[in-house]
Amino acid sequence: MPTTGALRFTAPEREVLLATRGVGPKVVERLEQMGLHTLAALADADARDLLEQGARLSGSSCWKNSPQARAAIQAAIASALAHVDGTR
């Protein structure tokens, strides 16, 4: 879990992410550990960069090489883009 005081997605934004197929609490937690805490920031992120950061944070290359991790990150970014575009 993120440390107390760490920036986190708001409850409504967290709901958007968790409603996304393939995105669970661990993916959201990892995004927060990477410094992402708004859908707007996630919408501007690059999937490849996030996968590399996730691999470094987890200490495992599976984040970078896993088709499931790639799909989850791409889906999270797509949901963020759709949500951000829908609120402009």
Image (cartoon, helix red, strand yellow):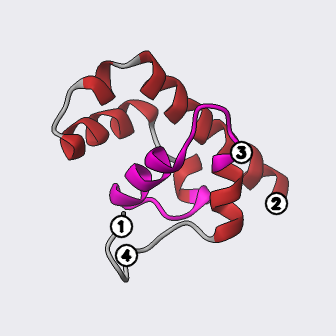
Q: Earlier in the sequence, mark 1 or mark 3?
A: 1
| Residue 7 position within the rendered picture, expressed as x and y whole percent measured from the top left | 43, 74
Q: Mark 3, residues whose alpha carbon is within 10 Å: few (<14), some, or many (≥20)?
A: few
**Tag 2: amino acid:** Thr
Q: Which residue is mark 3?
A: 19
Q: Are marks 4 and 1 in contact (CB under 8 Å)?
A: yes
| Residue 39 position within the rendered picture, expressed as x and y whole percent measured from the top left | 61, 57
Q: Residue furthest left?
A: 59
**Tag 1: amino acid:** Pro
CA gap, disc 4 and disc 1: 6 Å
Disc number for residue 6: 4
Tell me, yes or no, whether the highlighted magenta stretch contains residue 19.
yes
Circle 3: element type = loop
CA gap, disc 1 and disc 2: 27 Å
Q: Which residue is mark 1?
A: 2
Pick whichever, 49 or 63, lies toward us: 63
CA gap, disc 2 and disc 4: 25 Å
**Tag 3: amino acid:** Ala
Q: Which residue is mark 2?
A: 87
